[in-house]
C-alpha cells in the first residue's frame, strides 16, 4: 500500500514522505499462527517462510532499495 503523509520528527522537523507500507503500524506483533500444526509441519512451514523472506529481501536489494527502510512513529504522521 502506498501512503503519502507529512511526518513530524521528535526534534520538530517536518517532511513530506511517500512510503510503500510493508507492515501497518500497530501495537501488536503480526505473523502467521502455526499453533495448530505438528512440530514436523511447523518445521516445514518455517523453512518455507525463511526461503520466502530471503527471496523478498534479495529482490529488495536487487531493486537498490535496501537502504530505504524507514520506521515512522504513528504519532508523527500528520
Image: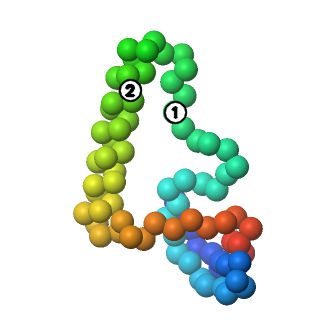
* Residue farthest left in this picture: 62
Residue 32 at x, y percent in the picture: 52, 33
Residue at image coords 52%, 75%: 18
Say which quadrant the C terminus sits in.
bottom right
16 on left or right of 58: right
Residue occupying image coordinates x 62% and y 42%: 29
x, y percent for residue 21? 53, 60
Identify the image quadrant of residue 4.
bottom right
Residue 31 or 39: which is nearer the viewer?
A: 39
Rendered residue at 34%/51% (across/down): 56
Above or below, 16 relative to 40 = below
The residue that mark 1 highlights is: 32
Q: Quadrant of residue 3?
A: bottom right
Q: Does the residue at mark 1 contact the one at mark 2 (Cβ under 8 Å)?
A: yes
The location of residue 40, given as percent across then percent down, is: 38, 14
Residue 2 vs residue 35, the one in the foreground: 35
Residue wearing tag 2: 45
Q: Secondary structure at mark 2?
A: helix
Classify 69 as above or below 48.
below
Furthest-bottom residue in this view: 13
| Residue 15 image point, x, y percent | 61, 84
Seen from the viewer's position, the closer of residues 77 and 67 is 67
Which label sits on residue 17?
Answer: none
Q: In the displayed structure, would residue 17 be above or below residue 31?
A: below
Q: Is residue 12 placed above or below 70 in the rendered structure?
A: below
What number of labels is visible?
2
Mark 1 or 2, nearer chain start: 1
Name which residue lies at 67% across and 66% down. Answer: 73
Could you tell me how far apart the alpha carbons at marks 1 and 2 are, in whole angstroms?
10 Å
Give the left or right position of residue 39, taking residue 76 as reference. left
* Number of residues whose C-alpha sits closer than 10 Å to that of mark 1, classed few (under 14), some (14–19) or many (20 or more): few
Amino acid at each position: 500500500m502506498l501512503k503519502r503523509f507529512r511526518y513530524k520528527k521528535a526534534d520538530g522537523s517536518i517532511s513530506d514522505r511517500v512510503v510503500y507500507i510493508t507492515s501497518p503500524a500497530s501495537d501488536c506483533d503480526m505473523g502467521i499462527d502455526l499453533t495448530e500444526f505438528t512440530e514436523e509441519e511447523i518445521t516445514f512451514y518455517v523453512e518455507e517462510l525463511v526461503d520466502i523472506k530471503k527471496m523478498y529481501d534479495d529482490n529488495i536489494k536487487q531493486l537498490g532499495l535496501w537502504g530505504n527502510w524507514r520506521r515512522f512513529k504513528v504519532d508523527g504522521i500528520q
